[in-house]
Image (cartoon, helix red, strand yellow):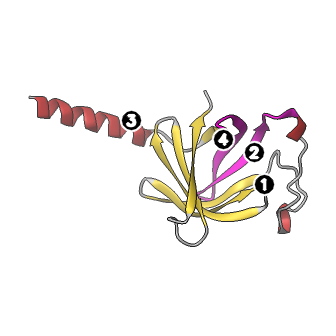
C-alpha cells in the first residue's frame, strides 16, 4: 500500500511540474542573491527567447550594453533580448545562447524547469561542464 501511495504521489508531482511552462516572467538574481532584473521568456517560431522587462536598480534603468558586439552594441539593456534560439528537447530547452549585458559575453545555454516556479539556466563556453548555473524564480 505504501508503495502504491508513493508511486501515485510521484506521478502527481511529475505531472504537476511537467504541466508548468517556462514561459512568463522570471526574477534574475545577482551574485549577492538579490533580484536585479525581471526577464520575460516567450515563444517565437517554436523557439524560446527572453528579454529584460524590468531593472531593479534605478541608476541602471537607462544602462546600455556598451561591451556588447554586433546588433546589441550600445542598445538599452531594458528591452534587450538576452536569451535566444532555445529549442525544446525533452524536458529542457537547449541549443540557444545568452548574452551577459554586464560584460557583453555570449554563452551557449540551456534551461530547464526544476520546480513549478524555479528555472535552471546553465551558460557555458564549449562544454557545459565549463559553465555557470543560475536559478531564476517565477515572478508571483
* Dominant secondary-structure state across the stretch colored magenta: strand
The location of residue 59, given as percent across then percent down, is 89, 37
Query: What residue sits right under mark 1 in the picture?
Result: 101
The circle drawn on residue 52 is 2
Q: Is residue 92 left or right of residue 140?
A: left
Mark 1 / mark 2, whichever is N-terminal: 2
Front in this rendered view, residue 130 or 46 = 130
Badge 1 vs badge 2, beta-carbon distance below 8 Å:
yes
Q: CA distance from mark 1 to mark 2?
A: 10 Å
Residue 30 colored in magenta in the image: yes
Q: Which residues are magenta?
A: 29-58
Depth order, front residue of 18/66: 66
Q: Residue at x 84, y 65 (%)?
A: 71
Residue position for label 4? 28
Q: Residue furthest front?
A: 32
Measure the C-alpha gap from mark 2 to mark 4. 10 Å
Q: Are marks 1 and 4 in contact (CB under 8 Å)?
A: no
Please state which of the two labelled residues, at mark 3 or mark 1, is closer to the viewer: 1
Which quadrant is the C terminus positioned in?
top right
Cβ atoms at labels 2 and 4 below 8 Å apart: no
Amino acid at each position: 500500500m505504501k508503495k502504491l501511495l508513493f508511486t501515485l504521489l510521484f506521478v502527481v508531482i511529475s505531472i504537476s511540474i511537467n504541466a508548468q511552462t517556462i514561459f512568463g516572467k522570471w526574477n534574475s538574481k545577482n551574485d549577492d542573491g538579490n533580484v536585479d532584473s525581471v526577464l520575460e521568456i516567450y515563444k517565437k517560431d517554436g523557439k524560446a527567447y527572453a528579454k529584460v522587462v524590468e531593472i531593479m536598480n534605478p541608476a541602471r534603468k537607462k544602462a546600455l550594453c556598451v561591451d556588447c558586439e554586433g546588433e546589441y552594441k550600445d542598445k538599452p539593456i531594458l528591452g534587450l533580448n538576452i536569451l535566444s534560439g532555445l529549442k525544446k528537447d525533452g524536458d529542457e530547452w537547449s541549443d540557444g545562447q545568452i548574452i551577459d549585458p554586464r560584460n557583453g559575453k555570449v554563452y551557449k545555454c540551456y534551461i530547464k524547469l526544476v520546480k513549478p516556479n524555479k528555472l535552471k539556466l546553465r551558460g557555458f563556453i564549449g562544454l557545459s561542464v565549463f559553465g555557470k548555473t543560475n536559478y531564476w524564480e517565477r515572478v508571483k
